[in-house]
Image (cartoon, rainbow, N blue to C red):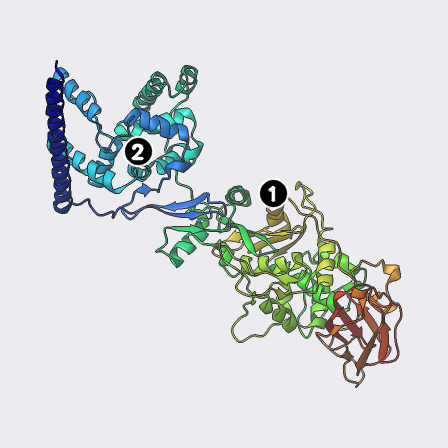
Amino acid sequence: MTQAQTGVALRRWLRRGAIALSVLAVLIAVAGVVLWRLDKLYPLPPDTISLSREVLDRDGALLRAYAARDGRWRLPADSEKLDPQFIEMLIAYEDKRFWSHSGVDLRALSRAAWQLATNGRIVSGGSTLSMQLARLLEPRDERSFTAKFRQIGRALQIERRMSKREILNRYLTLAPYGGNLEGVRAASLAWFGKEPHKLELAEAALLVALPQSPEARRPDRNPKIALMARNRVLDRMAQAGVIAEGEVARASGDAVPARRLPMPAYAAHLADAVMHSAPELQQHRLLISRNAQASLEKVATSGARRLGPNVSVAMILADASNGEILARVGSAGYFDPSRAGWIDMTRVLRSPGSTLKPFIYGLAFEEGLVMQETMIEDRPGDFSGYRPRNFDMAYQGDVSVRTALQMSLNVPAIRLLDSIGPARLAARMRRAGATPVLPPGESPGLAIGLGGAGLTLEQLVQLYGGIVNRGKVQPLRHLAGTEPTREPATILTPQAAWQITDILSGVMPPKGAPHLGVAYKTGTSYGYRDAWAVGYDGRHVLGVWGGRADGGSVPGLTGYDAAAPLLHEAFRRSGIGLNRFPPPPAGASRLPAADLPFSLRRFAASGNRPMAGAPPEAAPEIVFPPQGARVDLGLSRGVTDAPLALKINGGRAPFRWLANGKPLSQTFRRRTAMWVPDSSGSSTLTVIDAAGRAASVQIYIE
């Protein structure tokens, strides 16, 4: 061929190439116009499919799910959080060119058409995941070429509007898995009781097989068909090199699930409450720990069975340092009608029994009325017509304050409350966010000390959190991302709180319970209606209630025999790990009886109330230092022996002074005294006169 002929041929090929490119450009433009017109005439159906709402724990684990509006379990899926092997198997089995095609796999469609023509029946469908998603978004019962072409058009639309990852996520959210299960998360929870990122090989293979024929392959109804379909997936994955041959033999031996499991329903009462408070939200996150919640629910359920028919159990576990609720069991069984399980007993007002006694003793320690080894009478007494009796109808005579609280004796507690004043106890409780509910028109009386008021388990746990937290009460809260609604309130001074912990940590656990070293107090309401136990370590507080939801009597139901064993079992199984009690604060100590001042060796006075024959003088009043004063004695600069002058008005000599609950080395007949602090920080000063009347101030030493 000559040079001229070569040039002519080259120009001819260039013209043909230009014509081909022009035709291709026209075809692309026409296709674009056609797709645009199709989008206008046949837009994608609006995304109106509702999802199941979720309540999550503090780490994002599912506590409870609620069915979607159409009654289906449909949980959103995120392919990046699923088992990678499951994703690889799904794509290899359903649509191996998923990441490269544009919605339609021409090779798969051609193969399916050839198989139809040569076999006279459909051998393989050739549908991509995008085409299957189109069918799920716009479901139709018909199976025809027209329906297939419609799916192809929809798949092209979907690919233009969604990324591959979005398409995969949407498919995994809507794919059917039998019954009212849609999406891989709902299927994994219902068939295996786990989230899909924890799937084993055999489980993943079954979930790959189910969407092709979800009803025919349901493992609970057709286990043989489900087993065959699963093993077929395993064999094909081995042939494709996705899994090893040896893994197929091992996974093929696993059985398919025999029954469908219920959806998670942990912390059901609390989940209901947050859902009703904000029904528009798709997700709610709580401060609950699912592991602790599941453990306590098991303890409550088994404990209620042991306690008898119609008995329910409620529990709250909280972090006293910040008020976060880690577990909350409203009843022994949310779905158990025999125990009225739908009632959240953590929020129901009940008589707290003897569980308020630690706060009575704490106030007595604050006032300097007693110390742990102070002797107090446990004999019948008449308090203006109120005659308390001990639970066992027996009396111990003279006992130490420590023994009286550990044995939960009623009469000594009322003697102290009569001196302190029940109104003062009620005021402290109100300040801490736990207002005791009294009969209409009544004011706090001495009966409040033995359960004569209404409190909830939630309020009681909050109060005990103050003892754990050195006297500061953190409001309980359950929603993640929230902050305390108010500043911590003071229920007791740090020194008084330590004294209570020192006493309660010495109470022996009930028979058969492990010795965990927790401090705890029990209570039993009148008529055996409520059994209580509240315990704590150096950080956490756990409250347990047992009884009938209808308030009926349960003969023999007591806090020590019924609630205390559950308390110790719940602590042991909660998984939180026990924390040591903090060391005593400055000025707090347990003095032996021989070292007590003579006036503190026996409790006989009635607090601030004048005794018979009391002197006419006014009660003592501390005038210096005044309440809330900040006194600079140079301790922060290394000064160690600077005295602080103390001055009072009123009262009857002799006077005894207490600094942080510890008596000074001498009594004073003058209304002035000197005190040398041993450390900086908050301190409580108390003076008691000869008539037993007391006054206190809190100051800050610098």
Helix, strand or loop for disc 1? helix
Inspect this view and state whether residue 65 appears.
Answer: yes
In the foreground, 116 or 363: 116
Which residue is at 82% across, 76% downward? 646
Q: Nearer the viewer, mark 2 or mark 1?
A: 2
**Percent of width and height locating residue 460:** 58, 59
Q: Quadrant of residue 420?
A: bottom right
Q: Quadrant of residue 227?
A: top left
Which residue is at 12% across, 46% downward? 41
In the foreground, 661 or 337: 661
Inspect this view and state whether residue 180 appears.
Answer: no
Q: What count of labels does the image hold?
A: 2
Amino acid on which disc 2 is placed: Tyr
In the foreground, 488 or 368: 488
Circle 1 residue? 569
Circle 2 residue? 177
Q: Quadrant of the C terminus?
A: bottom right
**Percent of width and height locating residue 264:** 42, 42
The residue furthest bottom is 616
